[in-house]
Image (tube, helix red, strand yellow):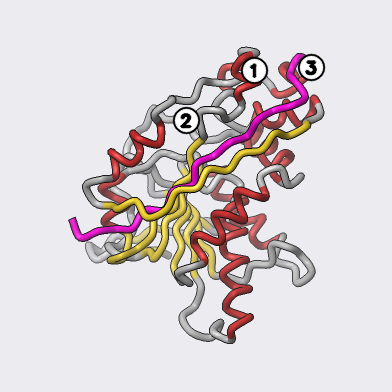
Amino acid sequence: MLGCDAGHRFDVNRRGYASLLSGSTKLIGDSAAMLDARDAFLEKGWYTELRDALSRLVGAGRPRRVVDIGCGTGYYLRGVLSALEQAGTADGSSAEAELRALAVDLSPVAVARTLRTATIRAEPAGSDSVAADTAGLVADVWSPLPIRDAAADVIINVFAPRNATEFHRILSPDGLLAVVVPHPTHLQELRAAGLALDVHANKVDGLIDSLSGGFRLESADDISRVLSLSPTDVGALIGMGPSSHHSGSPASVAAPAPTDVTVAFSLLGFRRTGA
């Protein structure tokens, strides 16, 4: 059971998460079909380079409280937590503060899957072995987040919406906000074929400007690769993101898609300031 200082109490369901959505929202969270496509694509390792870079950025500060806003399938959170646990084991510091994580998403299906896969893939022989205490929360990022002030050492935000005011509030002083956004060249072949949505050319500049009131840009890294994808992989890539809302089912778009596809990301690290 969860509780707040005002005396409200909320039950955690059998899937291990609580839903604290307040009022109605017109926003649509990821569907089960989108998450299936994302699992199919990501577990083949196509975005391993991005996950490793994110894990290095977060791991440099050895945080113990990680919040993933827009957790999706939990792919990036598992990588970050695994890296933090391995670093703690290597230097003998794993017995300090307990490593804890909170997976947040608008989609109940996404939160449930993140928690389930964190358990399933926590086998000793697995590459994503995670023993961190991970909880789940269904919430709307555009509303006040039901999270205590300064509760997080790090927020990770991968291809997800951002609420600068709330992020600033729930981050500890000098906490890290790690954000991943698509580079303008991301999926350029699919966009040229009309199979993917456009990426705003000034997305990074707009992000930096939107966070300037309470965050200082500390690092920026562009990651880009050209992948040779099968039609099935292309279908999963389209089906796992927002383009799926406009292109139909993954199967319907797989055949005409090109084989060579550029994937490009901007990974930015912001340090919370006192503003």
How many other residues sit within 10 Å of disc 2, few (<14), some (14-19) or many (≥20)? Answer: few
Front of the two marks 2 and 1:
1
Q: Answer yes or no: is residue 250 visible.
A: yes
Q: Residue at point 46% right, 53% down?
A: 156
Q: Residue at point 28% right, 66% down?
A: 173
Secondary structure mostly seen in the magenta stretch: strand
Residue ranking furthest to the left = 275
- Determine which of the numbered discs, if any, sits on residue 255 in the image: 3
Q: Is residue 231 left or right of residue 90?
A: right
Amino acid type assigned to the residue bearing label 1 in the image: Gly
Amino acid type assigned to the residue bearing label 3 in the image: Ala
State the CA–CA distance, disc 2 to disc 3: 27 Å
Q: Is residue 143 left or right of residue 60?
A: left
Q: Earlier in the sequence, mark 1 or mark 3?
A: 1
Q: Quadrant of residue 21?
A: top left
State the CA–CA distance, disc 1 to disc 3: 13 Å
Residue 126 drawn at (x, y percent): 76, 64
110 within the magenta span: no
